[in-house]
Amino acid sequence: MLALTLLTGCNDDKLKTLEAENQQMKARLRILETEHPSIDVAKLEAFGKDQLGTSIPDDDTPGFQRARASLAGVNAVRGALEKVSPLTTKAEIEQQLLNPLHALQDMWPAYISPANQQIDPMFQSCRDLPIVLRIGIEAGAVGNKTVLNLTSDLEKHIRFECALALSAATIKSKHKQEGKQ
């Protein structure tokens, strides 16, 4: 503190103000961390590689790893969805279906952010895929068959677009590598 005061030429009042602002910022950061827990993106990307790595090999296109993780995660949730019965509790639906979809959704950077600008736009369908499936599951959980049917059709279309984008990135990368040889 003394060094800070000497370097900045602050008086006691200014120093107290800065300390109070620092404490407020720390409190805001703690709130943000609890409201928006960090997502282990590397773990999700590794899951995507484990599930789809043989059919969709690695690629260095920005966003590819997350896109593959989205598709693999949605496939896993789809598999779990087939096991849902009328006896499945709301808590089980939340734990087994919705929480993984929230994690897949949250691993992507904010739409309006510099980080999102770096992701290849062809992967936007992969970004949207877990969102659409989540909306459908939530609609089904409350008995809204209309929304469930609409999102189901939309999810199939978006899943196809996502798989196509991943395949296109892989093919494009392969052609680049062959051109260098």
Image (cartoon, grey):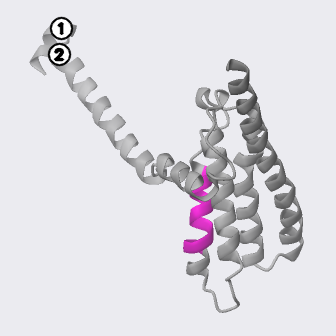
Nearer to the camera, 8 or 52: 52
Secondary structure under tag 2 reads helix
Residue 174 placement (x, y as % from top left): 72, 32
Q: Is residue 11 left or right of residue 22?
A: left
Q: Distance of mark 2 from mark 1, alpha carbons?
A: 5 Å
Q: Residue at x 64, y 67 (%)?
A: 76
Tell me the tag on residue 137.
none
Residue position marked by numbered label 2 in the rendering: 4
Which residue, as the protein is rendered here, is positioned at the far bottom?
87
x, y percent for residue 117:
66, 27
Residue at image mark 1: 7
Q: Please give left or right for residue 163 compared with residue 111 in the image.
A: right
Residue 9: tell me if it is visible. no
Residue occupying the far front of the picture: 181
> Residues at badges 2 and 1 in contact (C-beta under 8 Å)?
yes
Q: Quadrant of residue 12?
A: top left
The magenta span reads 94-105
Task: Give the position of the N terminus as an image quadrant.
Answer: top left
Q: Decide whether the magenta segment is chiefly helix, strand or loop.
A: helix
> Residue 133: horizontal and vertical position, in percent?
74, 62
Q: Position of residue 94 (x, y in %)?
A: 59, 73
